[in-house]
Image: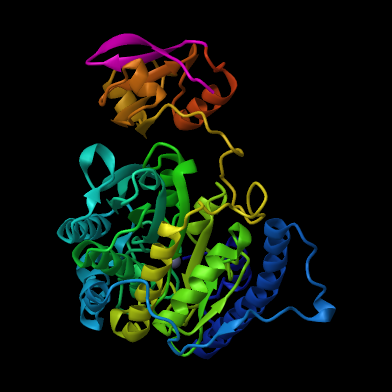
Amino acid sequence: MRRLLIFALVAALFSPLSAQDSQDRAAEILKKIELTIQKESERSRAELLDLVRQELRGTKPVDPAQGKPEPKAVDPAPKVPALSTEKARAIVTIDLLKKHAGYLASDELEGRCAGYPGCDKAADYIAESFKKSGLKPAGDNGTYFQKFRLVGKDTKNVIGLIEGTDPTLKNEYVVVGAHYDHVGTADQRDFGRMGGKGDDTIWNGADDNGSGTTCVLALAQAFGEGGLSARRTVIFMCFSGEEAGLVGSRFYTRNPVGGSLDKTAFMLNLDMVGRNPNKPMEIHGVGSAENGVIRKAVERAVQASGLKAKLNDAVTLMGGDSDHSSFAEKRVPFTFFFSGFHPDYHRPSDHADRLAYDNMVKVALTSMDILLEMGNLEERPKFSGKAKPALTLPDLEPPAQTRVLGVTVQELDDADCNGLKLAADQGGLRVDAVRAGMAAQAAGVKVGDVVLSVAGVTLPRGGTRDELRKVLTEKVTPGKEVDIVVLRSGERVVLKGKWTE
Ligand SMILES: [Zn+2]
């Protein structure tokens, strides 16, 4: 989970402490900051909720004078039988969750900061676990990894799937995701560390988001080893780069399994689900599909699992944001579980022994039933909002652009370009995977090619990916061939690309 900018600004207003401030004074100021953040959080939350409600529902905000309708609390006692099997449910035990979370939040993984070795170790562990569970790899070139660059370093999403059982519907996907990266150690790049004045220099991130990652691993195991499947294909996904600004999930939604996100019917996001067991779990976005189909599935699932929950139709950020937003802005119906902020949030003390494992078992069981119901729906759920929620963050790509090359690429940095002896203003995109049935494959683009120009437009250094997007949107006429120039084993090769729409 990543806090919105507003909190950074509020904190910055108060932050410079002069050297002579006594410890008491410092503590007092810190308290003030906490209070301000809390107040600001409540206020901005109310405003944000209304904005999003307005966007998603097309209605006017509720007049504060009339009071807001309280989110409906669902009775925690199990009332209906689960959709999943006894065998699958029996796999999700407290011990299993402790094992996963214990490792992910161990000092060995150094706080899993994207681009650093600890994060890569976590990715290996997740991939290994997916493999053991019997998931099919769904990353680049037959692996579980989908690589991307983040501020000059390599990092990766980890993706596996259980194929759907229906010959037609299996080409549609329901996704369960959680980010596995966190904010690292005191000497690493800072994507939002707080506190940390003592000798603990590792921000372990047990709740954020060892907890959601652990649930995804347990779900993969329950599906794979428990023999569960749905009519639609179920994709299990652990994102990197969330703390840096939802980078991994944004990369995924631009380079999804199946080539186009149109095939993704639903996304379930788990981010920080391991704390505050006495408060109801916040489940947001349940109104993001037409006809209340998500609400129905969620209500049913919590009634079967006994998870104490509070359902909210709107997208809400609660002063933070997470990977479901990357899907929501592309009109994918979603829901998001969040157990709330706590004093260890983004601090070194976010440790595995503070997680409420019994409640996390219920989170996993609830998710299992939601995935089964959404995966088996006869009708594909339809996003119920306008083009995208109001709460988009900066740095988003322009609205709806569906023309893609059909490749997974790495943007080359200056060193890479110089290594390839490219002209000073020539940038390039190295092709890491070619997706079946799309323009690049038809044109004969191969893995290892470096794309240099498309439709006569030379790709520049830095921002190469943006330029490609622009060219495909503005310069390509459906049905007309354009040149795609690639560098292949040192030779420039001109290929012919064509888009039908
Ligand atoms: Zn976070």
In the image, residue 244 above or below residue 340: above
Q: Answer with the quarter of the image where residue 196 lies.
A: bottom left
Within the image, what quadrant is residue 182 found in? Answer: bottom left
Per the picture, the main secondary structure of the magenta-coloured stretch is: strand
Colour pattern of the rendering:
rainbow
- At a point 46% along the width and 31% down the height, the residue shown is 465
Q: Is residue 21 visible?
A: yes
Instruction: Tell me the residue at 39%/60% (across/down).
Output: 176
Answer with left or right where residue 380 lies relative to residue 189: right
Using the image, determine if residue 184 lies above or below residue 77. Answer: above
Ligand 1, image quadrant it occupies:
bottom left
Residue placed at 49% from the left, 11% from the top?
A: 456
Residue 28 on the magenta segment = no
Is residue 500 found inside the magenta-colored segment of the image? yes
Nearest the eye: 22 or 423 = 423
Q: Quadrant of the C terminus?
A: top right
The answer to whether any part of residue 349 appears in the image is no
Position of 471 with respect to 204 (left or right) is right
- Which region of the structure is painted magenta? 480-501
Whether residue 3 sits left or right of residue 107 in the image: it is right
In-front residue for pair 254/193: 254
The image shows residue 473 at horizontal and vertical percentages of 57, 25
